[in-house]
Each structure stands twice: as C-alpha cells, then as structure tokens.
Image (cartoon, grey):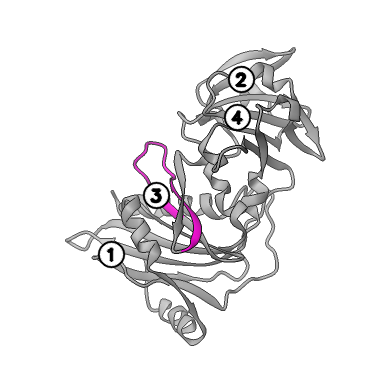
Amino acid sequence: MGGARIVVAASVAAAVIVSGCSAGASDPEPVVSDFGYRIETLPPGYSTCGVTTPSGVSVRSADDASLVVFGDGTLDDPYSGPLYGVAMFASSVPVASLGLGETTPVDLGGRPARLGGADGLQLASLPATAGNVLTWSDGDHTVQLVVRGDDGVDLLDLATRVIERDGVATLAPEALPVGFVELGDVFQLEGQPRFLFSIDHQRATASGDGLVDQLTLLGSDGDRASMEAFRFRALTSSRVTVGDAPGVVADLGPTGDGPWVVTWTPTDGVILSIFSFALQPDALMDVARSVRRVDGEEWQAMRSQADLLGCVR
C-alpha cells in the first residue's frame, strides 16, 4: 500500500470515528487537552512521528442533518442485529440528480424515489453490501430510509411510516419490529465528542522510502453511546473490553480488509480510538491494551518533542 494512500485513508478513518457530519459545522471555543494517552508498547518497526492537539477544531453535527438509528433492544448488543435508519438533510436537488450509485427509480405514492444499495447513502458511507437505501424528496429536504440486516422488509411500505418529529425524520413506533428501540441520532452522537489529541505512528518499508502502515491513536470526549454510534456504518463490529473498559472492534473498510479500529472509554467522558491499515484485530487489541494515560510534564514533553518530528504527508 502506498504511503500517500495510507495517509489520506487515515484522515478518512479518523473522521469516521471522531465526527458526524461536517456540513454547516462551526468551531466551538478552543479546546486544548492538558493530558493525553500514549501507546506504551509499539509493534516492531513503528515509531512516533507526530502529536496533534488542535485548539479550535471540533466538528459538530449540522443542524439540518439527522440520521436516527433503531436496533433490537432485546439483544445484549443491539448493533449485532438488524438496524434501521432514517436520514434527512436540507437539499433542493431533485432525487434524479443526486449521486446515488446504482439505484432504480420507483414511485412512492406519487413522489419520485430511488431504491438501491448502500453506496447511494448520502449522509454516511456504508459498505455497498451492508444495506438497502430508499431515497426521496420531502419539500426542501432529502430523506433516506436505510435497512441493514433485514432483507425481508418492504422499504416502500416502511417509507409510508416515516414521520417528522421536532424537525427530524424518524419512524413511527408502530412501524418498528417488536423489541426495536431508538439507539440515537448518529450525527448528534458522533458530533458530540470534542477532538482532544491524536498521536501518529508510522512503519516504513525496508528501503525506508515508503510506508507500510500508519497507526493512529485518537482522543476525544464523549460517552459510551457516542463511542458506539459509528458502528451503524462499519462493515462488521463487535463489543470488546480493553482492560476493564467497554469498547468496540470494527472494520471501517468496504471490502472486509480493514482499516480496523479499536475504540473504548477508559474513563468517564473520554473516548480512545486506535486504527491501523496493516495490523489485524487481535494485534490491534494488544496495542490498545498497552495504552496508558500521560499527564503533566510528561505530556507537555511529548507535545514539545512533536515539533521535532514529522509524519510522511
């Protein structure tokens, strides 16, 4: 894998974990962490190349976008079963003109709509094989109904039970399968955390003129619900524990080949996420278990030293 592709993909993966929707986002008051975490035991061949603690970068959800997700509340892990989602965002573009991938035109009670795979989802990227999407216009908004893991559902019929509540498109309770509960608005959940820091590590090729992998540790604030919200868009995911902390291991890519992420909440209010394009989940879990908190002078020294380091860009 080329170095440029790794670095670009790393930025994309970081965005998937940390933020929801950047459209219409605004910068909050500056946030600079006075602590961080570090990987105590790096895998062979990896070295630290940069520490970032932005003072004003924290992507929040746009006010005109939502993605409400539902899952089977009778399961120990609702994300492990079928998932329904209803997305809505401001748009005056006709459905026929939207870039929706391979979709088929259908009639939704006299309204033009398009039915297709998850590659047509506008608000959140899903692997194309991970679900079905029905898209239609509703005044000045575009609405998308997303179903994952339930091939027997009639999307056209289900769409007639989509309602608007408090400016958000959602499903009427009677439209949901028995046992389903609302897991939350993915954009609100993912947009909740503030980015605190990131530490990048790279592994070079034997010749030293290219990259094998970029390994990034991200820190943000948030709770368990926001830590798990990205799972709606992951190809596969499962709950794990990192030490005694609740977490998730997931495949962020569209083909089952990664990149992989382990994300967890080591303490109340803090989310850590570590992802790699080369390390398999078991190896990435081992790396996550070696992460420890860094405070005070040690953290300041790490930040200062970062000025002397440089990642391949």
Disc 2 and disc 4: Cα gap in Å? 12 Å
Which of pointers 2 and 1 indicates the residue nearer the eye? Answer: 1
Q: Nearer the viewer, mark 2 or mark 4?
A: 4
| Quarter of the image where the C terminus is located | bottom left
Disc 4 residue type?
Val
Secondary structure, mark 3, is: strand
Q: Which residue is under mark 4?
A: 146
Rounded to the nearest whole Å, what is the CA distance between mark 1 and mark 4? 39 Å
The answer to which of marks 1 and 3 sits earlier in the sequence is: 1
Residue 190: x %, y % from top left: 61, 51
Per the model, the C-alpha gap separating discs 1 and 3 is: 16 Å
Closest to the observer, 59 or 34: 34
User: Which segment did they paint magenta?
Assistant: 244-262
Q: Which residue is mark 1?
A: 43
Mark nearest the camera among 2 and 3 is 3
Q: Which mark is residue 114?
A: 2
Mark toward the start of the polypeptide (1 vs 4): 1
Percent x, y of residue 77? 54, 43
What amino acid does circle 3 point to? Trp
**Mark 3 vs mark 4, CA separation in Å:** 23 Å
Is residue 111 on the magenta stretch?
Answer: no
> Tag 1 or tag 2, which sits nearer the N-term?
1
The vertical placement of 304 against 168, above or below, is below
Q: Residues within 10 Å of mark 2 (few under 14, many from 20)?
A: many
Residue 110 vs 51, above or below: the answer is above
Front-most of 174 and 67?
A: 174
Residue type marked 1: Pro
Instruction: Say which label, 2 or 3, has the lower sequence index.
Output: 2
Circles 3 and 4 in contact, beta carbons < 8 Å: no
Look at mark 3 in the image and give the residue it sits on: 260
